[in-house]
Image (cartoon, rainbow, N blue to C red):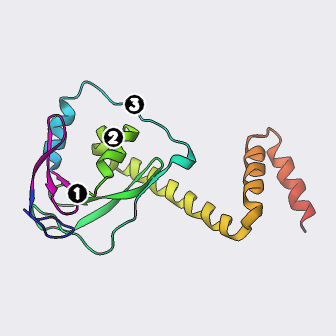
Amino acid sequence: MNCPVDDSAMSRSELMDGLSAFQCGKCFGHWLRFGDYLSWRERQPGDVPEVSVEESEELALEQPDGARFCPDCKYLLTRWEVGRGIHFALDRCGKCNGVWLDHPEWEMLRKRGLHDNLHQMFGPGWQFMARNEERKRRVEAQFKRQLGDDFERTRQFAEWVEKHPRRSEILAFIQSRVR
């Protein structure tokens, strides 16, 4: 079995106690067969609590270019957003459901307590949330570029208005002033 990133041979390793995967000796990524993951998940006593992070602690990895193929069945791997403050995508086989984890994606998931949610990450509800979060992040980044030094003050004001009980009147007043 060869690595989907660099075509190097992979060998068996353990991601966690009782969870085996295949690891590339060159890029240190892991191929996780979904059946192995589900068997491991069933043996776990319960859900690991998710650890929330501040915006400054958000986790991101550079996303790879080019297509990747499943080391087991050679099917095309598709990228699935993780979300929840983690800005990278996992590669999953659409045929056998195996998951490719670039180095250090598994550790980032573990750090956040999301490693036991892998089976949920590929569902429509999780993906809707992840795509919506990514869209909001991109829109905010665009406004940050456009507003420059005024962005932080504008963001704080927007948060204040959003929570204010007379939000509609405040926005109507602002709109009446800018015409």
66 with respect to 55 (left or right): left
176 with respect to 82 (left or right): right
Q: Report the Cα–Cα distance between label 2 and label 1.
A: 15 Å
Does residue 4 appear anywhere in the picture?
Answer: yes
Q: Report the Cα–Cα distance between label 3 and label 1.
A: 25 Å
Q: Is residue 28 magenta?
A: yes
171 with respect to 61 (left or right): right
Residue farthest toward the front in the current orientation of the protein? 26
Q: Which residue in the structure is indicated by mark 2?
A: 110
Depth-wise, is mark 3 or mark 1 nearer the camera? 1
Q: Residue at x 77, y 62 (%)?
A: 150
Q: Secondary structure at mark 2?
A: helix
- Residue type at mark 2: give it: Arg
Q: Which mark is residue 159?
A: none
Q: Residue at x 61, y 63 (%)?
A: 141
Q: Residue at x 45, y 36 (%)?
A: 51
Task: Measuring from the top left, give residue 113's x and y in whole percent.
Answer: 37, 37
For the C terminus, the image quarter is bottom right
Query: Magenta region: which residues?
Result: 11-32
Q: Which residue in the structure is indicated by mark 1?
A: 29
Q: Secondary structure at mark 3?
A: loop
